[in-house]
Amino acid sequence: MRDAPSLRYGPNPASRQPPQRSATPSSASVSAPRRRSGWGRTLGFLLLAGLAGAGWIERDALMSFAGYGDKPEAPAAQAKDKPAEGDPDTVTLDETGRTRAGVREGKAVIRRIVLPVRAPGTVAFDERRVTHLKPRTQGRVLSLAVQPGDRVHAGQVLATLDAAGILDARNGLASANAALGEAVASEQAAALQMKRGQDQLSFGGVAKAEVERRQVDLAKAQAAVKSAQANTDMYRAQYERLAPAEGAAPGTSAIVTPIAGVVTSVGITIGDVIDTARNAITVADPSRMLVLANLYGPDIARVKTGDQATIAAPIPGSERFAGTVGAINAALDPATNTAPARIEIANPGDTLRANMFVSVTIAADIGRSGVTIPAAAVQETEQGPIAFVRTGPDTFVRRALTLGIRRADWVEVEGGVAEGETVATQGSFALKAILLRSLLGSTD
């Protein structure tokens, strides 16, 4: 029927007013909501719309104020959540209200202030675990047993050379041995002549001057023996250094690695004639690697030797690597204006590779302790950060905060909260919303 609307809204169709809400108090207040004038309601809605756009209140609160909320009215026995009368910074919220708002709590505790410093890093070989192998003598490469990427063990022959220097060393040793034998024989003859002269001198068979001359000859012979012995030792050491490995062909020299690791580069080919100044093969031990974390700006002063570090590599399924800052370079990189921090880490399974980019997080010990609260307890306002401190069984007080170091899990509080106090963490936004509604003259 066409007159059904008039039956619903009253006898005057031109003033179709929606039915008044029930006088039963809602779950957000114990008192009936006050009637707002048209202009007052419009201004209040515009203010709430601005606050919602700024992130101060949620959309549900705005729709509820405008009268579009679709939540059913709560019974009168429902718990109350409203600012305490006479104190705009205190919110009263009983256990039922806290459960409905999802309020959780945490403690303000004193802890060591450790700031996570995040920096990009690059993996590199530890130069103390890298060897650049050169030939021991000039020669022509006869064989090459490795290529880049090969695993080698300590003492393994990597290449052999046809080295003429070995023959020179062997011939020099033989000549030195002959000269040593001649010097020893001369010394023995001089010693014999000296003994005979001393015997003859006792009965006048030889002049004293002759005995003194023989003493000089013996001293020269002894000096010649020492010189020949030194020359022999020199040639022997040279030959032993250049001598071929056991079972190798005479006149050949081997390039042997002193460490176990991986061949990273090979600078020779078969047939090359190389000398002792040329890098032939490079071997690196990848069991422990270096991570160079590029520190920038104030982080250079925050990070200290001994700080713990965690390295994340861009490898699917790879675990994080733990290490310790060993040193921080005193000079800045002119290209990046950063100071590299050296972090030595174990590398099981050769997971990390040289020149790989990684993410580094260093736990920088600031050198002090301070009061901290969970990060979820901090709410941002136009006047600055705040937190809600529980002061009674059902009361929370808003406190302005002065913050220090901020982390994802906790923040340092330099003022506003004392050690041992309880703060609202999860659900603290609901407490802020209650205070904001009170500023608009409403608690529904």
Image (spheres, grey):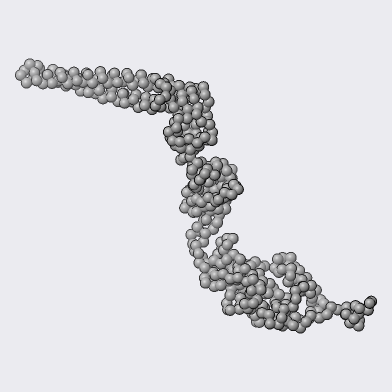
Q: Nearer the viewer, residue 364 or 299?
A: 364
Q: Nearer the viewer, residue 348 or 163?
A: 348
Quadrant of the image occupied by residue 45: bottom right
130 w.r.t. 425: above or below: above
Quarter of the rendering occupied by the N terminus? bottom right
Q: Position of residue 145 (x, y in %)?
A: 50, 29
Please give left or right for residue 68 compared with residue 418 in the image.
Answer: right
The residue under the point 80% across, 74% down is: 42
Asked if one can make out residue 194 in the rendered structure from this viewpoint, the answer is yes
Q: Position of residue 214 (x, y in %)?
A: 16, 19
Please give left or right for residue 102 compared with residue 261 in the image.
Answer: right
Please give left or right for residue 109 compared with residue 425 in the image.
Answer: left
Q: Looking at the image, which residue sits at the far left?
A: 203
Asked if one can make out residue 337 in the rendered structure from this viewpoint, the answer is no
148 w.r.t. 335: above or below: above
336 w.r.t. 216: above or below: below
Q: Position of residue 13 (x, y in %)?
A: 91, 79
Q: Position of residue 319 (x, y in %)?
A: 55, 50
The residue under the point 72% across, 78% down is: 74
Quarter of the rendering occupied by the C terminus? bottom right
Q: How many marks?
A: 0
Quadrant of the image occupied by residue 14: bottom right
The residue under the point 53% across, 25% down is: 269
Q: Looking at the image, which residue sits at the far top?
A: 205
The residue under the point 55% across, 42% down is: 353
